[in-house]
Every structure is written in C-alpha cells, then in structure tokens.
Image: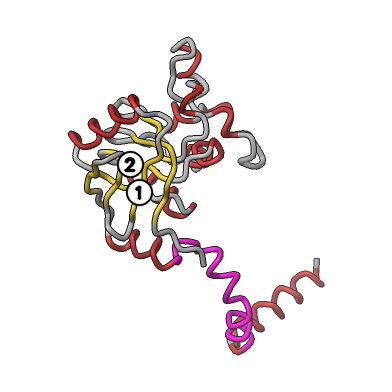
Amino acid sequence: MSQVKSISGRGIPLVGNDIDTDRIIPARFLRCVTFDGLGAQVFADDRPQTQGQHPFDQPYYQGAEILVVNRNFGCGSSREHAPQAIAKWGIKALVGESFAEIFFGNCIAMGIPCVTAKPTDVQRLQEWLAAHPQTAIVLDLEAMHIQFGDSSIPVMMNEGSRNMFLSGTWDACGQLIAQADPIQQIAARLPYVGWSRSVASALSSQI
C-alpha cells in the first residue's frame, strides 16, 4: 500500500470556473488504447487559443506538480481520460474551490488528492503562484493545510477519502492483488464457484 501524507512541488494556477472534462481532454483523444501520451494533449483546444499564454504552455510552470483551480473543476462527462491526462502531464495533487463528483472519485482512485479551500484563499494562492512560479509549495494531508512561502491556508477533504490516502487504502486494485492468496483460498471453499465452472465446461463441450 502506498500512503500519501504530503505532496511537495511547484504549483500551477489555472483560473476559471466550470472547466469541464471536454476542455481538459477533447473527445477525439478518447480513442486511445492506453492513457500513455495523453499528457501532451491536456487542454489541447484551449492552449492554441491563448497564443502560448496558457499556464500549461508557460516555461516556468513546466514540471509543476500541484494544480490550483477554481469552482466546479472537472464537470461535464465522466471520462477517466481527464484526470489521466492531468496526471500524465505531471500533476500529483489538485487544490480548488470545488470539484465535480465523478472527476473527484476518478482522481481518488488514481491516488491524486483533491482538496478544497475557500474561494478567497484559492485566489490568494493562485496570485502567489503567478508571482513565485519556481518556488515549491507543500500540501499536508495530515495537518490539512497548504504551505506557500511564509503563508498557509487550510484545506478540506472528506474524512473517508483523506483516511484512504493516509492509510494507503486508496488503491483498490492494489489491495486485491495484495490479497490474491486469501481470495483464492476463500473461492476454493465456495461450492457455487466450482458448480459454475462445471456448468460452463459442460456447456462449452456441447457447442
């Protein structure tokens, strides 16, 4: 299990409300077989419209690991490709005013904490990042605050999700793999598992 108690790295401010998953990763990129390469296409339609001024194009934000957004980030369709594209670009945590529920759940399942803060605090952090793009900030999930320079702001996350990160139980697939032997032992004792296999074998022999 991989515990996530704090994340340290440079931040990138992305100002705007209701940024949906269609903008995060346009629909034409959903045809990919794997998520590899999606990082280069994050905000593929937004970025050309800014003539190189989009935060994800700015050279001083390259390598940033904490994305700071505003209200209702990740709304729209439920595509997992959106958080995957953000993660492939290099983002390891998000701070915002609020997140769409399915987007939030997809991020948690990937091990990406999404914490919220008051709008005034988010704006303050975004302005600080614009002035100090090369200075690292720290998101502390134990103390539930984010430290930047000589300042800090409180952040929030529901206790269930927070405890999953602190205990390392956010990775559902990892937990299943770690418990493979006990799962197989229990399955071997279940009479209907053997019955279903014999029925399937009998049916296949008749085809």
Name the residue at 43% across, 31% down: 134
Amino acid type indicated by mark 2: Val
Magenta part mainly helix, strand or loop?
Answer: helix
Q: Residues within 10 Å of mark 1 (few under 14, many from 20)?
A: many
Give the quarter of the image for residue 200. Answer: bottom right
Q: Residues within 10 Å of mark 2 (few under 14, many from 20)?
A: many
- Give the left or right position of residue 33, taking residue 127 as reference: right
Q: Nearer the viewer, mark 1 or mark 2?
A: 1
Q: Which residue is mark 2?
A: 95
Q: Nearer the viewer, residue 59 or 92?
A: 59
Q: Earlier in the sequence, mark 1 or mark 2?
A: 2
Is 180 contained in the magenta span? Answer: yes
Q: Which residue is mark 1?
A: 139
Please state the horizontal and vertical placement of residue 170, each as a whole percent of the image: 45, 61
Amino acid type indicated by mark 1: Leu
Which mark is on residue 91?
Answer: none
- Give the left or right position of residue 9, taking residue 147 as reference: right
- Give the left or right position of residue 2, taking residue 76 as reference: right
Mark 1 and mark 2 in contact? Answer it, CB < 8 Å: yes
Please state the horizontal and vertical placement of residue 154, each as a whole percent of the image: 22, 48
Looking at the picture, does residue 75 appear above or below residue 203? above
Q: Magenta stretch?
A: 168-188
Name the residue at 31% across, 40% down: 148
Please state the horizontal and vertical placement of residue 3, each as a whole percent of the image: 46, 63
Looking at the picture, does residue 174 appear above or below residue 148? below
Q: Nearer the viewer, residue 34 or 151?
A: 151
- Could you say whether the residue bearing mark 2 is in a helix, strand or loop? strand
Give the quarter of the image for residue 74. Answer: top left
Please state the horizontal and vertical placement of residue 36, each as a whole percent of the image: 64, 39
